[in-house]
Image (tube, coloured by chain):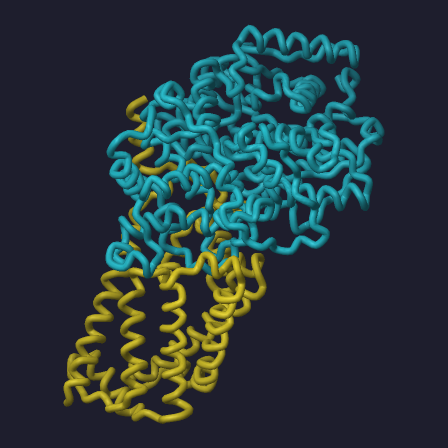
Amino acid sequence: MNAASYAFAMLFYLAVLVMAAGLATRILTYWRTPAPLKIPTTPAPVTSAGVGFRMAREILLFESLFKSNLWIWGLGWVFHVALALVLARHLRYFTEPIWPWVTLLQPFGIYAGFAMVAGVLGLWARRIFVERIRYISTISDHLMLVLLVGIASSGLGMRFIAHTDVIGVKLFFLGLMRADLHPLPGDGLLYVHLALVAGLMIIFPFSKLLHAPGIFFSPTRNQADDPRERRHIAPWAEQLELRR
Amino acid sequence: MAVELKAPALREYPVVPALQSDAMKDVVSYVANEKIQEAIGFPGKLDEGWQERAISKMGDLLGKYRSLRVFMDACVHCGACTDKCHYFIGTQDPKNMPVARQDLMRSVYRRYFTTAGKLFPRLVGARDLTRGVLDDWFRYYHQCSECRRCSVFCPYGIDTAEITMAGREILDAVGYGQKYSNEIIGKVHRIGNNLGLPGPALRDTLLGLEEDVKDETGVDVRYPLDEKGADVLLVTPSADFFAEPHVDSLIGYGKVFHAAGISWTLSSYSSEAGNFGMFIGNYEQLRKIAMRIREAALELGVKRIVVGECGHAWRVAYSFWNTLVGIGAGGKDPFAIELQRQLDPRHKQPTHICELTWDLIERGALRFDKDANDHRTITFHDSCNVARGSRMGDAPGGQFEIPRNIIRAVANKFVEMSPEVTRERTFCCGGGGGLLTDELLDLRIKGALPRMESLKQVVDNHGVNFMATICAICKAQFTKVLPYYGFKMSMVGGVHQLVSTAIRLGDSH
């Protein structure tokens, strides 16, 4: 066991803790904050099953974005689907035996890495070259893209250029999960990859990555259009009635 | 105005315009004076310590409104909304892009309410709430008509209207309110309607209408006021009582009730459907104004509440009344039960006048001479609050179909504008959301640009000469801005104006 192995072990424990606790706090805040008025963007579904379907379309297909702009939709959707495939593929490093569906996804997951980079670079190009989007971009918007490109390209580098010791990596992470530390292979590209991933996990609950839990709580999307049939009232608004 | 205002040129191909920073910096709404502010319970003017009060109000709203809380965090600056706002398209001012308008507040939110913004303000675009920032809030939160078009296109459903409302709420809380909206809210409480028309004047106006209709049709159509025991209470925007073309729709409602044999009444206590409490984002005002309608309904003992042609009023009535004052079904609390005991559960409460008319048409209770509208080639402008903040009928999208069905039932020539700019994608008239005031005329003219372009298409290609709409603000705004684009102001009118022209009176009973 070398110092780097210990350092990365601690880093990942910290990253998981920050991400889990941060997200839990954030989600709890969203959960507890009432939506006092019915504000679905209409036309909206009138039943909760309909709302489920609308949310599914929004989350899986990015329906609203599709209506808005085909470029952003195409690049964004490709990026997110590729990211999902890549993440699924990475489950192999955390499971033994590897789940059969993860094995099945392997070949797609590997090439999805390229799609991910292509999607991010496309979005980045828009951020730089489209005047309107350049105007609204902050430094952190660019840094987020740096982070994603860094993670994806270091990962692809280990798969296609300088192979890393994947068996060693897997032992390290399986060990982490059982609090039984194993050495991490000494590989520069791997260090870069893991450090950036841990960084992404740590900033997740403090950044615009909160769009992921946020969409589930968006009242314009997750409310049913039934205000005449059901009385909807927030606890703080109910207090006003006592004062009448 | 000293400078002569001009409409921007219509674009042949609607490309996204280039940015012009600060293009609308000098178009600022009037600030409410102390008297106006204090009359509705807000601090009179911006005093020492406003900054802490603003931040504390923001914290209060973040805890009360999930929309604001989630919307502040969720935006990824993807740019999907950047070209969707009519005010951006018409003015090219980048701060009129929905996301930039949101960021005026988001930057402050990040500074005071997020770890990242407290530690690394420059990195995440966080800013202190300075007087300059507050002035920008006042400026640009009064260049948003709360039309929700951006929310249709946002992948997270972020609705800039919610943020504008929060911005105005904070401004009011620190004594920096808008004259136009707050003065009107004061009038509703004092006199009963937005235009400050007192009861006796209203009675005279209605008697005058009865005479006019008698002269024109030979039939005794009634326009009753404060009649206890009537079945229907009609609440309609007060502009319907005397503004052109609004009054023609009021005449139409009366004819529909007459022809169907429905007893109805207006209320002098509650002679206003509009609710500017929504525009300023203030729940208490929203509720107090809605309460007047509930009180009038209880006082007059009506069985049904019907709302006239008014966009934001219908959003408030349809989406909020049940929540605010229990007008609707399903409430199990004493507050709501009291009203439900009186209102007839077989009807939707509240009912839009178009729902009522279309239902009568479907049941064969009304008859029309469609040819009477033959001098008109009609198109329909969907009003934003009806389109994206409410519904009519039983199915989603009824708010689009029912008014169109009525038009087709009463007229022969109906033409749609481009599907890119109708229904849920409709463009605001340019004057909604508390901006229908003269000092913002430049903004209103420019904001109408996208609608004027689509209107031009159907005028040129199909000879359209009448744009029907079901919103008092749309009617007033178009009447004012159509001439700037070379159209006649009489081109705009209500759906019930068309009904009024074609309906047969007297012989159906």
Residue B181 relative to residue B456: left or right: left
Residue B109, x across and y down, in percent: 32, 48
Q: Position of residue B63 (x, y in %)?
A: 29, 43
Q: Position of residue A215 (x, y in %)?
A: 41, 56
Please give the name of the residue rendered at 58% of the width and 11% of the height, measured from the top-left corner. Answer: B202
One can see residue B223 in this view: yes
Residue name at image x 72 percent, y 19 percent? B259
Classify B265 as above or below B168.
Answer: above
Give the residue drawn at x 58%, y 15%: B265
On the question of residue B253 being in view, the answer is no
Tell me the quarter of the image containing the N terminus of chain B: top right
Q: Quadrant of residue B406?
A: top right
Instruction: Give the left or right position of residue B122, taking residue A39 as reference.
Output: left
As rendered, which of A14 and A3 lies closer to the eye? Answer: A3
Q: Using the image as rendered, state which of residue B183 and residue B349 is in the foreground.
A: B183
Tint applied to chain B in the drawing: cyan
Query: According to the rendering, which colour does chain A have?
Result: yellow
Q: Nearer the viewer, residue B414 or A133?
A: A133
User: Height in image: B37 above or below B228?
Assistant: below
How many circles with numbers are drawn on the protein? 0
Q: Residue furthest front?
A: B2
Query: Up-down: is B81 above or below B453?
Result: below
- Which residue: 21% across, 78% down? A177
Q: Quadrant of the C terminus of chain B?
A: top right
